Image (tube, rainbow, N blue to C red):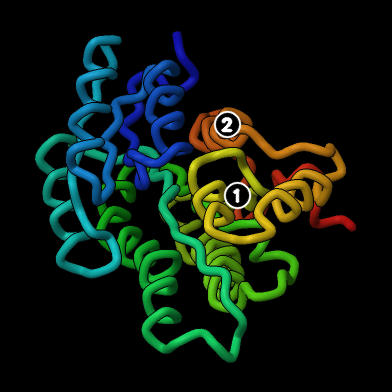
Amino acid sequence: MGRLEGKNVVISGATGGQGQVACRMFGDEGANVIGTDVDEQAGVALSKELGEKGHPFSFIAADLSNSAGVDTLGAAVEERFDRVDAVYNNHGIILGKPLLETTEAEWDKIHDIDLKSVFLIMKRLVPLMTERGGSIINVSSVGGLVAFANMAAYGAAKGGLAMFSKVAAVDLAPHNIRVNAICPGVIDTPMPRNFVSGLAERDQIWTGFEQGHLTGRLGRSEEVVSLAIYLASDESTFMTGAAIPIDGGWSVQ
């Protein structure tokens, strides 16, 4: 029996590199998964793959940066699940730009996607968790714990998400809902590769990413998702309100 056998789980950012790994690994542990993202075509392909493996999986295309999109997700979840046991807020975008060159629109976009959306999702889905309790896992970042040059908007959003998770843990404790944040270092997924691809010094920057971790390498999606599975499982019922670095030691330097 899997560690998440019979649990109903919602995973956002489902069609990204780490999100697809999450949907597969949560399914391998016996979870019933609803995945959501903006890329409907990729979601259809993921649904087909997981269906062929026998995993109970549904995909909902939704823009989570606004209430209308979150309501679309919420209605679909209510239609498929009688309750929600875990929410894995795995979605997010990145912006690398000097503070004084960051526009108001760029600032708003990254906060809408990386921070406000999590608030909206929790408001919409927590009522489906209050009867039996559950676990919410929010993906922050090492960039929410330590300062990186040219990452003001991203750092503010991810740092805000780490603190929001702590406050939410306090507020939702009476409902037996645990809330924790995961703070990954640089994980080898398409997101950081796309981030550096257009930069003249991309090779040097990539080497810097690797050397910035005490482990001397980038993280793997499976390592981050394994932590999320632990937090979603009954093995972690004494754990809430934490912002957990999984960053190869970057944040201790």
The circle drawn on residue 104 is none
Question: Which amino acid does the dot numbered 2 rest on?
Answer: Tyr
Task: Give percent across and percent down for residue 200.
Answer: 63, 61
Q: Which type of secondary structure does the marked residue at label 1 adopt?
A: strand
Q: Tell whether 113 sits left or right of 153.
A: left
Question: Which amino acid does the dot numbered 1 rest on?
Answer: Ile
Give above or below for 79 relative to 105: above
Q: Nearer the viewer, residue 219 or 179?
A: 219
Residue 41, picture quadrant: top left
Q: Is residue 179 visible?
A: no
Residue sitting at 64 percent across and 65 percent down?
144
Residue sitting at 44 percent across and 57 percent down?
92
Disc 1: CA contacts within 10 A as few (<14), some (14-19) or many (>=20): many
Judged by depth in the image, the label closer to the viewer, 2 or 1, is 1
Q: Tell whether 22 sits left or right of 128.
A: right
Task: Give percent across and percent down for residue 108.
Answer: 39, 80
Residue sitting at 25 percent across and 36 percent down?
42
Q: Tell whether 65 sits left or right of 203.
A: left
Q: Is residue 130 visible?
A: yes
Q: Which type of secondary structure does the marked residue at label 2 adopt?
A: helix
The circle drawn on residue 182 is 1
The circle drawn on residue 230 is 2
Task: Give percent across and percent down for residue 129.
Answer: 32, 47
N-terminal label among 2 and 1: 1
Q: Tell whether 41 sits left or right of 6.
A: left
Residue 101, picture quadrant: bottom right
Residue sitting at 59 percent across and 64 percent down?
162
Mark 2 touching mark 1, by CB under 8 A? Answer: no
Task: Give percent across and percent down for residue 149.
Answer: 71, 74
